[in-house]
Image (spheres, helix red, strand yellow):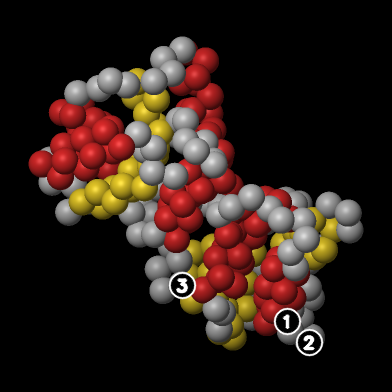
Amino acid sequence: MPKILAIEDDPTTGEEIVAELSQHGFEVVWIADGRDGLISAVSGDFDAILLDRMLPRLDGLAIVTIIRKAGIDIPVLMISALSDVDERVRGLRAGGDDYMTKPFASEELAARLEVLLRRRAAIPRQAALTVADLEIDLMSRTVRRAGVEIRLMPTEYKLLEFMVRNSGQVLTRTMIFEAIWGYHFDPGTNLIDVHLGRLRRKLDRPGLPPLLHTIRGSGYALHAPA
Protein backbone atom coordinates (compact mmCIF):
# COMPACT_ATOMS: atom_id res chain seq x y z
CA MET A 1 0.00 0.00 0.00
CA PRO A 2 1.59 3.32 -1.07
CA LYS A 3 2.22 5.67 1.85
CA ILE A 4 1.44 9.32 1.19
CA LEU A 5 2.38 12.35 3.29
CA ALA A 6 -0.32 15.01 2.92
CA ILE A 7 0.71 18.48 4.14
CA GLU A 8 -2.47 20.56 4.11
CA ASP A 9 -3.55 23.15 6.69
CA ASP A 10 -7.28 23.29 5.94
CA PRO A 11 -9.05 20.74 8.21
CA THR A 12 -11.90 20.07 5.80
CA THR A 13 -9.60 19.51 2.83
CA GLY A 14 -7.23 17.42 4.93
CA GLU A 15 -9.98 15.12 6.14
CA GLU A 16 -11.33 14.77 2.60
CA ILE A 17 -7.89 13.87 1.24
CA VAL A 18 -7.43 11.16 3.90
CA ALA A 19 -10.89 9.69 3.29
CA GLU A 20 -10.76 9.81 -0.50
CA LEU A 21 -7.20 8.51 -0.96
CA SER A 22 -7.84 5.74 1.56
CA GLN A 23 -10.68 4.54 -0.65
CA HIS A 24 -8.22 4.36 -3.55
CA GLY A 25 -5.80 2.13 -1.65
CA PHE A 26 -3.39 4.71 -0.21
CA GLU A 27 -2.18 5.00 3.36
CA VAL A 28 -2.24 8.70 4.23
CA VAL A 29 -0.47 10.61 6.99
CA TRP A 30 -1.95 14.10 7.25
CA ILE A 31 -0.03 17.03 8.81
CA ALA A 32 -1.52 20.52 9.01
CA ASP A 33 1.64 22.56 9.61
CA GLY A 34 4.45 23.42 7.20
CA ARG A 35 7.37 23.06 9.59
CA ASP A 36 6.11 19.77 11.06
CA GLY A 37 5.42 18.58 7.52
CA LEU A 38 9.00 19.28 6.50
CA ILE A 39 10.35 17.32 9.47
CA SER A 40 8.18 14.35 8.47
CA ALA A 41 9.19 14.66 4.81
CA VAL A 42 12.88 14.58 5.70
CA SER A 43 12.73 11.85 8.34
CA GLY A 44 9.76 9.75 7.27
CA ASP A 45 9.42 6.85 4.86
CA PHE A 46 6.87 7.94 2.27
CA ASP A 47 6.24 7.04 -1.37
CA ALA A 48 4.96 10.50 -2.35
CA ILE A 49 4.13 13.89 -0.85
CA LEU A 50 0.92 15.82 -1.42
CA LEU A 51 1.93 19.40 -0.65
CA ASP A 52 -0.25 22.47 -0.24
CA ARG A 53 1.23 25.71 -1.59
CA MET A 54 0.13 27.97 1.29
CA LEU A 55 0.92 26.68 4.78
CA PRO A 56 1.50 28.14 8.26
CA ARG A 57 5.10 28.59 9.51
CA LEU A 58 6.69 27.27 6.28
CA ASP A 59 5.10 27.39 2.83
CA GLY A 60 5.06 24.70 0.20
CA LEU A 61 7.72 26.30 -2.02
CA ALA A 62 10.17 26.43 0.88
CA ILE A 63 9.47 22.80 1.79
CA VAL A 64 10.02 21.39 -1.70
CA THR A 65 13.13 23.54 -2.17
CA ILE A 66 14.67 22.26 1.08
CA ILE A 67 13.98 18.58 0.43
CA ARG A 68 15.40 18.82 -3.11
CA LYS A 69 18.56 20.48 -1.77
CA ALA A 70 18.79 17.61 0.71
CA GLY A 71 18.84 15.15 -2.19
CA ILE A 72 15.41 13.68 -1.44
CA ASP A 73 13.87 12.59 -4.73
CA ILE A 74 10.42 11.56 -3.48
CA PRO A 75 7.62 12.60 -5.89
CA VAL A 76 5.85 15.81 -4.85
CA LEU A 77 2.37 16.72 -6.07
CA MET A 78 1.65 20.34 -5.20
CA ILE A 79 -1.93 21.53 -4.66
CA SER A 80 -3.09 25.11 -4.41
CA ALA A 81 -5.98 27.52 -4.79
CA LEU A 82 -3.52 29.71 -6.73
CA SER A 83 -4.29 28.97 -10.36
CA ASP A 84 -2.06 31.51 -12.13
CA VAL A 85 0.36 30.05 -14.65
CA ASP A 86 3.23 31.82 -12.88
CA GLU A 87 2.37 30.09 -9.62
CA ARG A 88 2.29 26.67 -11.27
CA VAL A 89 5.65 27.38 -12.90
CA ARG A 90 7.14 28.47 -9.57
CA GLY A 91 5.97 25.25 -7.93
CA LEU A 92 7.40 23.05 -10.65
CA ARG A 93 10.69 24.92 -10.84
CA ALA A 94 11.11 24.69 -7.08
CA GLY A 95 11.08 20.90 -7.40
CA GLY A 96 7.45 19.84 -7.62
CA ASP A 97 6.66 16.98 -10.00
CA ASP A 98 3.06 17.96 -10.67
CA TYR A 99 0.62 20.74 -9.74
CA MET A 100 -3.13 20.62 -9.19
CA THR A 101 -5.48 23.55 -8.64
CA LYS A 102 -8.20 23.37 -5.97
CA PRO A 103 -10.93 22.24 -6.05
CA PHE A 104 -10.16 18.89 -7.65
CA ALA A 105 -11.87 15.52 -8.06
CA SER A 106 -10.65 12.69 -5.84
CA GLU A 107 -10.37 10.38 -8.86
CA GLU A 108 -7.98 12.76 -10.60
CA LEU A 109 -5.92 13.25 -7.44
CA ALA A 110 -5.52 9.49 -7.02
CA ALA A 111 -4.73 9.05 -10.73
CA ARG A 112 -2.01 11.70 -10.67
CA LEU A 113 -0.40 10.13 -7.61
CA GLU A 114 -0.47 6.74 -9.34
CA VAL A 115 1.28 8.24 -12.38
CA LEU A 116 3.99 9.78 -10.22
CA LEU A 117 4.55 6.49 -8.41
CA ARG A 118 4.77 4.54 -11.69
CA ARG A 119 7.20 7.09 -13.08
CA ARG A 120 9.40 6.79 -10.01
CA ALA A 121 9.33 2.99 -10.09
CA ALA A 122 10.51 3.02 -13.71
CA ILE A 123 13.63 5.06 -12.88
CA PRO A 124 16.63 2.97 -11.78
CA ARG A 125 17.47 3.93 -8.21
CA GLN A 126 20.96 5.12 -7.42
CA ALA A 127 22.72 2.50 -5.31
CA ALA A 128 25.77 4.42 -4.10
CA LEU A 129 27.36 7.84 -3.83
CA THR A 130 31.11 8.31 -4.13
CA VAL A 131 33.60 11.12 -3.71
CA ALA A 132 37.27 10.12 -4.09
CA ASP A 133 37.77 7.12 -1.76
CA LEU A 134 34.54 7.77 0.15
CA GLU A 135 31.52 5.60 -0.67
CA ILE A 136 27.99 5.66 0.71
CA ASP A 137 25.87 2.56 0.08
CA LEU A 138 22.35 3.98 -0.10
CA MET A 139 20.68 0.59 0.24
CA SER A 140 22.42 -0.56 3.42
CA ARG A 141 23.19 3.00 4.60
CA THR A 142 26.82 2.09 5.24
CA VAL A 143 29.80 4.39 4.74
CA ARG A 144 33.37 3.43 3.84
CA ARG A 145 36.48 5.46 3.29
CA ALA A 146 39.59 3.83 1.80
CA GLY A 147 37.79 0.51 2.27
CA VAL A 148 37.25 0.95 6.01
CA GLU A 149 33.71 1.16 7.33
CA ILE A 150 32.80 4.34 9.24
CA ARG A 151 30.06 4.01 11.85
CA LEU A 152 27.84 7.06 11.93
CA MET A 153 24.93 8.17 14.05
CA PRO A 154 21.67 8.79 12.10
CA THR A 155 22.10 12.58 12.00
CA GLU A 156 25.77 12.24 10.99
CA TYR A 157 24.75 9.93 8.15
CA LYS A 158 22.04 12.32 6.97
CA LEU A 159 24.51 15.22 7.11
CA LEU A 160 27.16 13.32 5.17
CA GLU A 161 24.70 12.18 2.49
CA PHE A 162 23.49 15.75 2.03
CA MET A 163 27.05 17.03 1.64
CA VAL A 164 28.08 14.25 -0.74
CA ARG A 165 25.01 14.82 -2.93
CA ASN A 166 26.12 18.46 -3.09
CA SER A 167 29.84 17.78 -3.29
CA GLY A 168 31.94 20.59 -4.66
CA GLN A 169 29.38 23.22 -3.61
CA VAL A 170 29.70 25.64 -0.73
CA LEU A 171 26.84 24.92 1.68
CA THR A 172 25.87 27.71 4.04
CA ARG A 173 24.98 27.02 7.65
CA THR A 174 21.38 27.95 6.90
CA MET A 175 21.17 25.46 4.02
CA ILE A 176 22.59 22.68 6.17
CA PHE A 177 20.42 23.46 9.17
CA GLU A 178 17.15 23.57 7.24
CA ALA A 179 17.97 20.46 5.19
CA ILE A 180 18.97 18.29 8.16
CA TRP A 181 16.93 19.59 11.09
CA GLY A 182 13.98 20.90 9.13
CA TYR A 183 13.32 24.27 10.71
CA HIS A 184 14.59 27.82 10.39
CA PHE A 185 18.22 28.44 11.28
CA ASP A 186 19.06 29.83 14.71
CA PRO A 187 22.33 31.73 14.30
CA GLY A 188 23.10 31.27 18.00
CA THR A 189 23.16 27.47 17.94
CA ASN A 190 26.34 25.39 17.75
CA LEU A 191 24.47 22.29 16.59
CA ILE A 192 26.08 22.33 13.15
CA ASP A 193 29.59 22.79 14.55
CA VAL A 194 29.16 19.89 16.96
CA HIS A 195 27.93 17.44 14.31
CA LEU A 196 30.41 18.55 11.65
CA GLY A 197 33.23 18.25 14.18
CA ARG A 198 32.24 14.66 14.96
CA LEU A 199 31.82 13.85 11.30
CA ARG A 200 35.19 15.36 10.39
CA ARG A 201 36.98 13.29 13.05
CA LYS A 202 35.43 10.09 11.71
CA LEU A 203 35.84 10.97 8.04
CA ASP A 204 39.27 12.61 7.83
CA ARG A 205 41.37 10.08 9.67
CA PRO A 206 45.13 10.59 10.14
CA GLY A 207 47.04 9.83 6.94
CA LEU A 208 44.09 10.56 4.66
CA PRO A 209 43.68 13.85 2.76
CA PRO A 210 40.75 15.90 4.14
CA LEU A 211 37.42 15.81 2.32
CA LEU A 212 35.43 18.10 4.60
CA HIS A 213 36.43 21.75 4.45
CA THR A 214 35.40 24.93 6.27
CA ILE A 215 35.02 27.85 3.89
CA ARG A 216 35.67 30.82 6.15
CA GLY A 217 32.83 33.32 6.11
CA SER A 218 30.72 31.20 3.76
CA GLY A 219 30.03 27.72 5.09
CA TYR A 220 31.28 24.22 4.41
CA ALA A 221 32.13 22.03 1.43
CA LEU A 222 32.94 18.41 0.80
CA HIS A 223 35.09 17.66 -2.21
CA ALA A 224 37.82 15.35 -3.44
CA PRO A 225 41.45 16.28 -2.72
CA ALA A 226 43.00 18.55 -5.35
Taking the image as drawn, is residue 90 in sight? yes
Instruction: For mark 3, give the secondary structure.
Output: loop
Task: Tell me the CA gap for discs 2 and 3.
Answer: 24 Å
Residue under pointer 3: 141
Instruction: For mark 1, give the secondary structure.
Output: helix
Q: Position of residue 136 (x, y in %)?
A: 53, 69
Residue visible at 30% across and 37% down in the picture: 11
Q: Position of residue 98 (x, y in %)?
A: 38, 29
- Count up the numbered dots: 3
Which of discs 2 and 3 lies nearer the camera? The answer is 3
In the displayed image of the protein, which residue is found farthest to the right? 216
Determine whether, in the image, residue 80 is placed left or right of residue 39.
left
Whether tag 3 and tag 1 are in contact, CB under 8 A, the answer is no
The amino acid pointed to by label 2 is Pro
Residue visible at 56% across and 79% down in the picture: 152
Task: Classify mark 2: residues with Cα within 10 Å, few (<14), some (14-19) or many (20+).
Answer: few
Which of discs 2 and 1 lies nearer the camera? The answer is 1
- Mark sitting on residue 206: 2
Q: Closer to the camera, 26 or 55? A: 55
The amino acid pointed to by label 3 is Arg
**Measured along the vertical axis of the image, is residue 178 above or below residue 63?**
below
Quadrant position of the N terminus in the picture: bottom left
Instruction: For mark 2, give the secondary structure.
Output: loop
- Mark sitting on residue 169: none
**Measured along the vertical axis of the image, is residue 75 above or below residue 160?**
above
2 or 3: tag closer to the N-terminus: 3
Residue under pointer 1: 201
